[in-house]
Image (cartoon, rainbow, N blue to C red):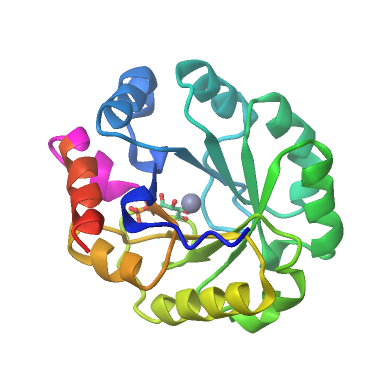
């Protein structure tokens, strides 16, 4: 079933990349209080991206802190090496990078074998055309609207065109992937981005670096509901 979701059912997935890991439990509670739908977890290996974050141990900790679905974004090379561990840690969605995998179709199948939903992500320099051959086989497409690796960067405006292209391909082929966007999302651009057709907004620093994270999350929701 094609899911052009209603604006009031946009999924908001706070990225804990910008959270304070010394108080992970209360940081998760804050976004639950603000109405988060999913929790987005950014796994970086220092090879695919020039930064290191965390692995399955933290995903497992978050899984024990919340009932919300865990949206795991793997910015790692050879992601298939880690699927079993991320499965055991409670991942509900695993998104791999198109640029990081040699055999995309097989990698997506391996995710599905664990009963986990699969996503494919593209960096700003990768076109939608390049992932077109795999769009029948994914549950989610994650458009990186900043260079992956760090929070707090500026939204790259050309990402909006990718949303339009993915909407068109989905409608024409009766595909059912969700469209997610990650990087530089804030209250001032959320409504324009959502109007272009995304289903999921990932936001890190806008929420966690604000003085009042639940209120920041609610302001995002309000921005997309008033469309
Ligand atoms: C960046 C990560 C993002 C990041 C977004 O590589 O994939 O999820 O946390 O952070 P903001 O919202 O600060 O751009
Ligand atoms: Zn991410």
In this rendering, the answer to whether 22 lies above or below 2 is above
The magenta span reads 203-214
Identity of the residue drawn at 76% across and 36% down: 115
Residue 161 locus on image (x, y percent)? 44, 82
- The quadrant of the rendering that contains the N terminus is bottom right
Q: Quadrant of residue 100?
A: bottom right
Asked whether 61 or 199 is in front, the reply is: 199
Residue 65 vertical position relative to residue 200 in the rendered view, above or below: above
Q: Position of residue 96 (x, y in %)?
A: 66, 55
Q: Is residue 206 magenta?
A: yes
Residue at 72 percent across and 25 percent down: it is 88
Please, which residue is most extreme toward the left here? 211
The image quarter in which residue 187 lies: bottom left
Residue 78 position, x and y percent, is 77, 52
Residue 157 horizontal side relative to residue 109, left or right: left
Horizontal side, residue 111 vs residue 173: left or right: right
Q: Considering only vertical position in the picture, is 143 above or below 7?
A: below
Q: Is residue 144 left or right of residue 31?
A: right
Q: Is residue 209 visible?
A: no
Residue positioned 64% across, 55% down in the render: 47
Quadrant assignment for the C terminus: bottom left
In the picture, measured across the screen, residue 33 lies left or right of residue 196, that is left
Where does residue 226 sit, x and y in percent of width and height? Answer: 18, 58
Verify whether residue 38 appears in magenta: no
* Residue appearing at x 38%, y 52% in the figure: 10
């Amino acid at each position: 079933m094609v899911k052009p979701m209603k604006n009031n059912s946009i999924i908001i997935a706070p990225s804990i990349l910008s959270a304070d890991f010394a108080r992970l439990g209360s940081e998760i509670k804050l976004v639950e209080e603000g109405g988060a739908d999913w929790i987005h977890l950014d796994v970086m290996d220092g090879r695919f991206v020039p930064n290191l974050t965390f692995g399955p141990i933290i995903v497992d900790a978050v899984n024990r802190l919340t009932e919300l679905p865990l949206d795991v974004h793997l910015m790692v090379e050879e992601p298939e090496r880690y699927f079993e561990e991320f499965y055991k840690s409670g991942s509900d969605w695993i998104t791999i990078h198109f640029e990081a995998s040699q055999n995309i179709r097989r990698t997506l199948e391996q995710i599905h074998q664990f009963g986990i939903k699969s996503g494919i992500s593209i960096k700003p320099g990768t076109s939608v055309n390049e992932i077109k051959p795999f769009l029948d086989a994914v549950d989610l497409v994650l458009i990186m609207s900043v260079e992956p690796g760090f929070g707090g960067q500026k939204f790259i405006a050309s990402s909006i065109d990718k949303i339009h292209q993915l909407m068109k391909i989905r409608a024409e082929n009766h595909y059912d992937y969700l469209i997610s966007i990650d990087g530089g999302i804030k209250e001032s651009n959320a409504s324009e981005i959502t109007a272009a057709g995304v289903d999921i907004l990932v936001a890190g620093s806008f929420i966690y670096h604000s003085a009042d994270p639940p209120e920041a999350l609610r302001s995002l929701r309000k921005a997309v509901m008033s469309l």
